[in-house]
Amino acid sequence: MFQKVLFRFSCYFLVLVFCLQFQPLYGAIKDDKEFIGKQAPLLRGKKAIGRGLLSLDKLMKEYKGLKKDKNGKPVAIWKHNVVVLNFFSTDCIPCMKEIPTYNKLAKKYENKDVKMIYINVEADVNPVDLRLFVARKNIRVPMMIPDQRVAVKNYNAYRLPRLVIINKQQKIEHIITGFNENLDQEISAIVDRLLK
C-alpha cells in the first residue's frame, strides 16, 4: 500500500515538473489574483458515482420552471447558486484531511442555494478504485472526473488542495490553496456573505 502511494506521489511530482518545464504547452502557472472576478470556466466530466455527467454550468444555474409575465407569455425561472469546487487527488494527504470538513459544510448548506463538488484531477483515475475510495472515506459530496489537463489549466490547479468559490453571477469570488485548519470558518464566512 505504502509503495503504491509513494509511486503515485512520484508520478504526480514528475507530471508537475514536466508541466513546469513545458509551460507553453500546458499554460503558465498564474497568480490567483488573475482569476478573481473573472467568469468561471465551464467544466464537465463523468460522475464518480453513478452514471451520467456533471456540468458546472448546470450547478451554477438551475432551471426551476415557467411563469407567465405581465403579457401572459411564459418565462423561464432560474435559480442561481454559489458553487464551491474542491480540486483534489486521492494521493494528496492534505486533501484527505479536508474531507470531514467539506462533508460538514455540504450538510450545512444542503437546503440553501449552494452546490459543493469535488473535482478529481488525477491523470489516470480508475473508476472502480475511485468508487471504493469514496465509500471508504465516507465522501458525501458529488465528485466530477473531468479532463484532467483542462481542469488543471483552466483553474490553475497545479497545487492541491485547491478550493474555488464561485458567486451567483458565475464569477470566481475566492480561491483557497493548501490545507487550512480554519477551513470551515473561512468558507462559511465567504458563502454566507454571497448568499445575502
Image (cartoon, rainbow, N blue to C red):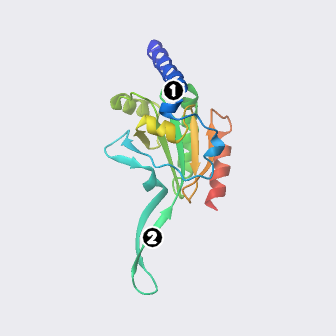
User: Where is 193 relative to 150, above or below?
Assistant: below
Q: Which residue is mark 1?
A: 22
Q: Nearer the viewer, residue 173 or 88?
A: 173
Give me the residue at 58% from left, 48% from top: 165
> Which of the two labelled residues, at mark 2 and mark 1, occupies the earlier sequence position?
1
- Kindly identify the amino acid type of the residue bearing the numbered disc 2: Ile
Instruction: Classify 5 as above or below 142.
Output: above
Provide the secondary structure element on which disc 2 rests.
strand
Numbered disc in front, either 2 or 1: 1
User: Which percent across, then down, holds residue 185?
Assistant: 68, 44
Residue 129, located in which quarter of the rendered image? Answer: top left
Give the farthest residue toward the bottom. 71
Q: Which residue appears at 48% of the width and 44% of the height?
A: 117
**Residue occupying the point 52% across, 20% down:** 13
* Residue 46 % position (x, y): 36, 42
Quadrant of the drawing holding the C terminus? bottom right
Q: Which mark is residue 77?
A: 2
Residue extending furthest toward the front: 24
| Pointer 1 local density, CA inside 10 Å: few below 14, some 14–19, many at least 20 | few
Instruction: Kindly state the secondary structure of the residue where label 1 is placed.
Output: loop
User: Is 120 on the left or on the right of 93, as rendered?
Assistant: left
